[in-house]
Amino acid sequence: MARYDFDLFTIGGGSGGVAASRRAGAHGAGVALCEDRDVGGTCVHRGCVPKKLLVYGAHFREEFQDAEGYGWTVQEPLFTWSKLLAAKDKELDRLRGVYARLLRDSGVTLLEGRGRVVDPHTVEVAGKLYTAERILIATGSRPYLPPDITGIEHAITSDEALSFPELPRRLAVVGAGYIGVELAGVFHGLGSKVTMLIRGASVLGGFDDDVRSFLTDEMRKKGIELMTDTFIRDIEKRAEGGVSLLTGGGETVEADAVLFATGRVPNSGGLGLEEVGVTLDARGAVVVDAWSRTSVESIYAVGDITDRINLTPVAISEGRALAETLFNDNPTQMDHTNVPSAVFSQPPVASVGLTEQEARERHGKLDIYVTSFRPMKHTLSGRNERTMMKVVVERESNRVLGCHMVGTDAPEIIQGLAVAVKCGVTKKQLDATVGIHPTAAEEFVTLRDKRPDPDERLAAELGRDAAASTRR
């Protein structure tokens, strides 16, 4: 008789949990997966997929406007929020069924309910106990609402924003990370008046400084109001509807809704992890090693719950690597270096590799190549939108350390460059690559002029001043 009910029990049906469970099942393991919401997780139902569908919808307003520059006469378009929501929800329902079917086809037993670890080999779901040789925690993350703000209960998160019953006429967005800039662009594109309130001077903390300042300027040009160096002190619900925000500087902002996009936290509460000896960090993330092993030998974790690189493709890769290691005699670690990422802002951002600041700290002398230009499409559309591209190169080795772009098709372009950066491409090899003309992407292989190094420029100026002083 089998010692356990399953070889693997996965708690969480998001990207990482589904990927690991399917791959383990395909290798012949007996696998169960429990999920208390929707199979597919945040990415499919409250993140990447619905967000991208709304981004597509928001683009049409500008496309209609741009068409006139190309000879089209377009009648005043009419947007209906309920139609877009219905189409989005229909696609999510389809994907929900697809994910459930993929798990069944891989032999995975799907259980409804939130799992709780009882001991290193036992999980409780809906009052029933299941045993497994190994347990995988893949419960992802959840939106964070700062508890110290008076009236925070009147705010919404990205979960609710993707399903507004009515399109808000005025939307306040607090926070300027991935989610904040993406949803600000969506609702501005769909017709809402959007005000962003951010603590810093520019959006997208953690990205390259040139990317941050360039996108900040482009968002302002589109008509999104950015209140920088601002924090929220109080939120008040208005009797006539909507909310009033009081900033730390004493200003008030009136809106129909306020969206807090102030980050996400690991969804580790109520799982029984600490009780069985699994180590969590200060943010509640499960601490794992390079093999996704926790402090308990039989328990593993992948995806956002580990707070390593919180991206869907990373969670999928971690899950597949774990299944290969445990059930296919193929020890595999997820490589977390040079992971590309994209922000579906308007215009979009994409990056791979190191920022300029990171590269200077780790590699010293650099050559920096930056260009900004008006895309060919807008020479006739008349739109005042620009594209920025940047390549960070280690001077001594000529190796490309980072590629960054703000502009139309940035995610599609950077995906190809990510392969090159992963393979250690040099600037010389980029220069030897023939560009596809006419495209924006060709600019990455035609960059020739280096930006002056600030330290070297300062040294040169000091040298000239010293020489002049000697002559005097």
Image (cartoon, rainbow, N blue to C red):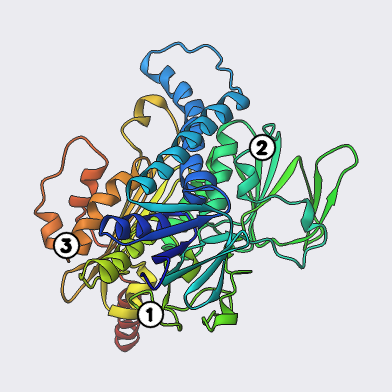
- The amino acid type, in three-letter code, at marker 1 is Asp
Above-or-below relation of 273 to 42 = below
- The amino acid type, in three-letter code, at marker 2 is Phe
Label 3 or label 1, whichever comes before in sequence order? 1
* Residue visible at 46% across and 57% down in the picture: 33
Q: Quadrant of the N terminus?
A: bottom left
Q: CA distance from mark 3 to mark 2?
A: 47 Å
Q: Quadrant of the C terminus?
A: bottom left
**Residue 215 spot, x, y in % from top left:** 47, 50
Q: Quadrant of residue 162?
A: top right
**Residue 315 spot, x, y in % from top left:** 39, 61
10 Å crowding of disc 1: few (<14), some (14-19), many (20+): few
Which of 11/55 is in front? 11
**Residue 402 spot, x, y in % from top left:** 29, 63
Q: Is residue 65 left or right of residue 174?
A: left
10 Å crowding of disc 3: few (<14), some (14-19), many (20+): many
Label 1 or label 2, whichever comes before in sequence order? 2
Which of 437/244 is in front? 244
Which element type, helix, strand or loop, lies under badge 2? loop
Q: CA distance from mark 1 to mark 2?
A: 40 Å
Q: Which mark is residue 289?
A: 1
**Extreme residue toward the right, this view:** 239
Which element type, helix, strand or loop, lies under badge 1? loop
